[in-house]
Image (spheres, grey):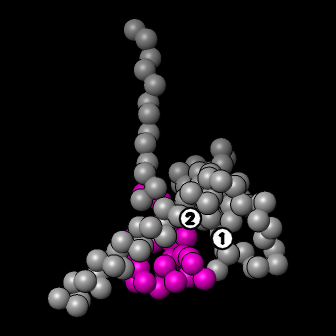
Amino acid sequence: MTASAVVVRRSVLGRACPACAELRCADPAECLHFLTAHPWADCSECAGSGWAGEDDCLSVFCWACNGSGLVEHSARSIVHATVSPRARVRHQAHVERLTALVSSSSVAVAA
């Protein structure tokens, strides 16, 4: 009998928010402001992948970024070239998700 491969799939939404480190943001508007007002780049621990290292048996995701692959930087410490395309896409996905949450909640409040 041949062995079959086990495939694990996780969506971007299964990873923690880089701003509040929660799976579901308690205040999406604040997280959205934080993500758009501060510079973000690849996590230095996981090189932006979001996955834990081979020697970390306690978690699937990186301990430093909680799987987001992004960490906040100061404006002086980040150089545009150090932000990978993958980090830009991941950051944009978080911003779009939070924008949708904020816009849908403001419509519900206004109604």
Q: Which residue is mark 1?
A: 40
Which is nearer the eye, 14 or 41? 41
Q: Is residue 41 left or right of residue 34?
A: right
Q: Which residue is mark 2?
A: 91
* Rendered location of residue 42, percent (x, y): 68, 61
Quarter of the rendering containing residue 89: bottom right
* Rendered location of residue 33, percent (x, y): 52, 83
Name which residue type carries label 2. His
The residue shown at (43%, 20%) is: 4
Q: Is residue 34 magenta?
A: yes
- In the image, residue 100 above or below residue 51: below
User: Of the numbered discs in the image, which one, if any, rests on residue 63?
Assistant: none
The residue shown at (44%, 39%) is: 8
Name which residue type carries label 1. Trp
* Rendered location of residue 68, percent (x, y): 55, 61
Tags 1 and 2 in contact by the CB under 8 Å rule? yes
Camera sees residue 66: no
